[in-house]
Image (tube, helix red, strand yellow):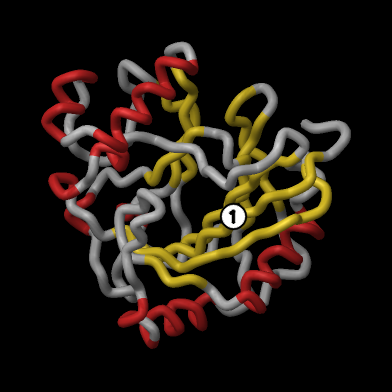
Amino acid sequence: MFNPEPRIQVLPITPRQACYVIDDALVDPDRWVEYAVAHAGEFAESPDNAYPGPELRMADAVSAQLDAFFVRHLRRALGARRTLRMYSRLAMTTRAPADLQPRQWLCHVDRLDVAPDQCQVASVLYLFAGPALGGTSFFRPKRPLPEIARLIDDSARMSADEFSARHGLAPGYMTDSNAWFDRVLTVPPRYNRLLFYSGTVFHSGAITAPERLDPDPRRGRLTWNGFFACRRALTTQ
């Protein structure tokens, strides 16, 4: 399924963390676009996370191939040892800015409930050709983490009006720096481009042209997202 000889580009996010970029990652990416088309009716929005659109869980055997690629090529670079659990899903970004919940106005970290001796890694593979549909941006908090934690908690429990009034944020996808976060890196999309990064880094889809979002997997922002909980390496990057 995956390119057996990938070329990996390293893009720094912080002095200790980076995004690892692999172009031409899949041998036959068109196969997975057609898979999404064939299973379009099975995509559904999940109440358990803040993804702004419907998702489709991938079969464990398919996710295992993504994990095998990670283990062979990226695990050591991301400070991980053994994969303890992982899963992956296809996803379509479809929500209009006015329909986003407050928690979807913000960048985020991935929450896999890992123990202190574990780490979490995320991946995203772009299965769309239009660069206007947006890549992935990474952010650094500008305020103390307790204040960031309160902001995130408020975003999950407040109405849009309450949240906007308290924190001075407006509905919409987060595409640039604001009073709370600095944007430090944006990786543009490219068809069949795969990214790996620490799930503890704040990140968000760089949706600068939301009017181009489309629910059709052949035309919309279709991605394959992976989530890994791993034993932390004895010496991390």
x and y percentages locating residue 113 in the rendered image:
60, 43
Q: Quadrant of the N terminus?
A: bottom right
Furthest-right residue in view?
234
Q: Left of 59 or right of it: where is 165?
A: left
x and y percentages locating residue 200 in the rendered image:
58, 35
Q: Left of 31 or right of it: where is 75?
A: right
Residue 101 image-quadrant placement: top left
What amino acid type should be assigned to the residue bearing mark 1? Phe
Count how many numbered circles sit on residues in the image.
1
Q: Residue at x 65, y 60 (%)?
A: 86
Q: Is residue 160 above or below residue 60?
A: above
Q: Residue at x 39, y 84 (%)?
A: 39
Residue 166 image-quadrant placement: top left
Q: Which residue is mark 1?
A: 227
x and y percentages locating residue 2 in the rendered image:
68, 71
Q: Left of 101 or right of it: where is 34?
A: right
Q: Residue at x 31, y 82 (%)?
A: 41
Q: Is residue 210 above or below residue 143?
A: below
Q: Quadrant of the C terminus?
A: top right
Q: Secondary structure at mark 1?
A: strand
Residue 173 image-quadrant placement: top left
Q: Residue at x 84, y 39 (%)?
A: 233
Front residue of 140 and 2: 140
Using a 10 Å C-alpha cutoff, classify the residue at mark 1 as few (fewer than 14 neighbours), some (14 to 19) or many (20 or more).
Answer: many
Furthest-bottom residue in view?
38
x and y percentages locating residue 171 in the rendered image:
18, 36
Furthest-top residue in view?
144
